[in-house]
Image (tube, rainbow, N blue to C red):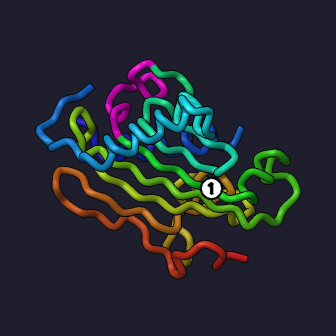
């Protein structure tokens, strides 16, 4: 059975992408279906979203997790488990600057936000929300930090991680402070 740790294994891949079908009995979330319809209409009218769900001008991804790897193949990096989940990712201009510079000209006030919703037909059934900030330095993934967060991708920190799996709510990380801009 898949679990949160499988999802955490995908986190580095999600970040790297920004930086360079399992059925269940959960009901369909009508608001997500409406969002997808609006997104498709916007794309058809020449709006800012591409076919995968990215709007680089708005620094936003809004769509099926299947699109985050830029291949609409019913999988996320070869694994179908989370492909039908709805994902909203947001990042700021500093994230883009760091990405463009290869994170070689610090400091950066970069942040990213991931909101996963698998509570829809064909979804994983899981819901997760992550806040990630640039902190510099280097260290191993998962290294606990003094403020309650943990290191990921070498020079980034997960400052908030919470969600549901098997109808149980988990707070994995709630750093102090847990807001963007607090790490300058």
Is 110 rendered above or below residue 70? below
- Relative image position of residue 137 (x, y in whole percent): 74, 62
- Mark 1: secondary structure: strand
**Residue occupying image coordinates x 42% and y 68%:** 173
Residue lying farthest to the front in this orientation = 45
Is 20 rendered above or below residue 183? above
**Residue occupying image coordinates x 58% and y 38%:** 49
* Snapshot quadrant of residue 19: top right
* Snapshot quadrant of residue 22: top left
Q: Which residues are magenta?
A: 73-85
Which residue was labeled with disc 1?
A: 91
- Relative image position of residue 50 (x, y in whole percent): 59, 32
Check the picture and name the quadrant holding the N terminus: top left
**Mostly what secondary structure, the magenta segment?**
loop
**Residue occupying image coordinates x 74% and y 57%:** 93
Residue lying farthest to the top in this orientation = 73
**Residue occupying image coordinates x 21% and y 36%:** 121
Report whether 173 appears left or right of 99. Answer: left
Q: Residue 59 magenta-drawn? A: no
Check the picture and name the quadrant holding the C terminus: bottom right
Residue lying farthest to the left in this orientation = 25
Report whether 126 appears left or right of 112. Answer: left
Residue sitting nearer the eye, 176 or 146: 176
Residue sitting nearer the eye, 34 or 151: 34
Is 180 rendered above or below residue 137? below
């Amino acid at each position: 059975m898949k679990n949160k740790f499988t999802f955490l294994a995908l986190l580095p891949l999600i970040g790297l992408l920004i930086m360079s079908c399992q059925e269940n009995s959960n009901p369909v979330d009508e608001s997500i279906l409406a969002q997808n319809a609006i997104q498709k209409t916007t794309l058809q009218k020449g709006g800012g979203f591409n076919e995968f769900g990215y709007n680089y001008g708005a620094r936003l991804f809004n769509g099926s997790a299947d699109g985050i790897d830029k291949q609409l193949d019913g999988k996320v990096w070869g694994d179908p488990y989370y492909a039908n989940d709805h994902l909203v990712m947001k990042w700021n201009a500093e994230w883009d600057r760091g990405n463009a510079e290869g994170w070689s000209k610090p400091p950066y006030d970069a942040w990213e936000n991931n909101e996963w919703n698998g509570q829809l037909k064909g979804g994983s059934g899981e819901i997760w929300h992550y806040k990630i900030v640039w902190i510099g330095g280097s260290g191993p993934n998962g290294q606990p930090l003094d403020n309650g967060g943990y290191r990921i991708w070498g020079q980034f920190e997960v400052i908030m991680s919470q969600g549901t799996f098997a109808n149980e709510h988990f707070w994995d990380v709630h750093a102090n402070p847990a807001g963007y801009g607090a790490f300058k």
